[in-house]
Amino acid sequence: MSEMDVDPELRDDAMDRFPVPDYEDLPEDLQERIVEETERAGFTPNVFSALAYRPSHFRAFFAYHDALVEETALEREEIEMIVVAVSGVNHCYYCNVAHGALVRIYADDPLLADQLVANYRTADINEAHRTMLDVAVKLTERPTEVEEADLEALREAGFSEEALWDIASVTAFYNLSNRLAMFAGMRPNEEFHTLGRE
C-alpha cells in the first residue's frame, strides 16, 4: 500500500440504508483500490464506501466501470454527459452531484452539468450530443421503443459503431448504478458539490 497525504475514510453517512464497513476489515484489493481513488480525488468518494458492503459486487462494478471509461470510442466528457442526463431523468441524487462534478471538469464548463440535470434538451450542446442524449434518455425511459432509426440517427450524427455500443453500455450501466444508489440511500460527498465550478 502506498504512502499518501489523505487517509481513506469510509464515511458512515455514505449511505442511509446499509452499514458502511470498516476500511481495516476490507479485503486487500479493495483497500488498494480505495487508496488509489482517495489519492486521485483527495477524498474517498462515497460510492466506494457504499459498494464495499459487498466486496464481490464492488470488484465487478468497478471492473465494468473501468472498461467503460478506458476502452471506449467516446470522449470522457461524452460519457459523463450521458451519466448526468440519465441520472437527471432518474432523479439520482448521488450521480447527479458526483458525475455533475466530472462533467464540469472534463467539459471544462461550470454550467453544463446543471443544464443537463435540469433538462438536457435545453442545454448548450451540439446536435451530435443532443442526438446521443436523446437516445440515452429514450433507452432509460422507454427501452421497448428503441429501434433501428435511433441507431441510424447516431450514425448520421457521426458516431462509429463502437461508439453506438458504448453509448448504450454507459446508459445501461448508470441506470443500474442510479437504482442501486437510490435503493441504498447513497449520499454524495460534500466535495463534489463545488468541484469544477470555477
Image (tube, rainbow, N blue to C red):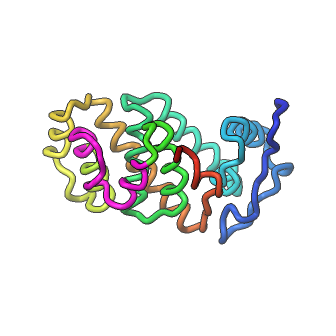
Figure label count: 0
Whole-percent x, y for residue 143 in the image:
27, 57
The quarter of the rendered structure image containing the N terminus is top right
Q: Left of 68 or right of it: where is 30?
A: right
What residue is at 64 percent from the left and 52 percent from the top?
Answer: 191
Q: Is 164 located above or below residue 14 in the figure?
A: above
Against 106, residue 10 (above or below) is below
Q: Which residue is more in the foreground, 65 or 91?
A: 91
Task: Indicate yes or no whether the magenta region holds residue 91.
Answer: no
Image quadrant assignment for residue 49: bottom right
> Where residue 51 sits: x, y (%)?
65, 54
What is the quadrant of residue 132 in the picture? top left
Q: Residue at x 46, y 46 (%)?
A: 110
Position of 165 compared to 98: left or right? left
Predominant secondary structure, magenta span: helix
Q: Is residue 120 magenta?
A: yes
Residue 125 falls in image quadrant:
top left
Q: Tell me which segment is drawn in magenta.
A: 111-131
Q: Is residue 111 left or right of residue 101?
A: left
Q: Residue furthest front?
A: 198
Looking at the image, which residue is at 18% across and 46% down? 150
Residue located at (55% from left, 59% from top): 94
Residue 26, x across and y down, in percent: 80, 48
Query: Is 17 rendered above or below residue 132?
Result: below
Nearer-the-camera pick, 192 or 134: 192
Residue 127 lies, in percent from the top left, at 21, 41
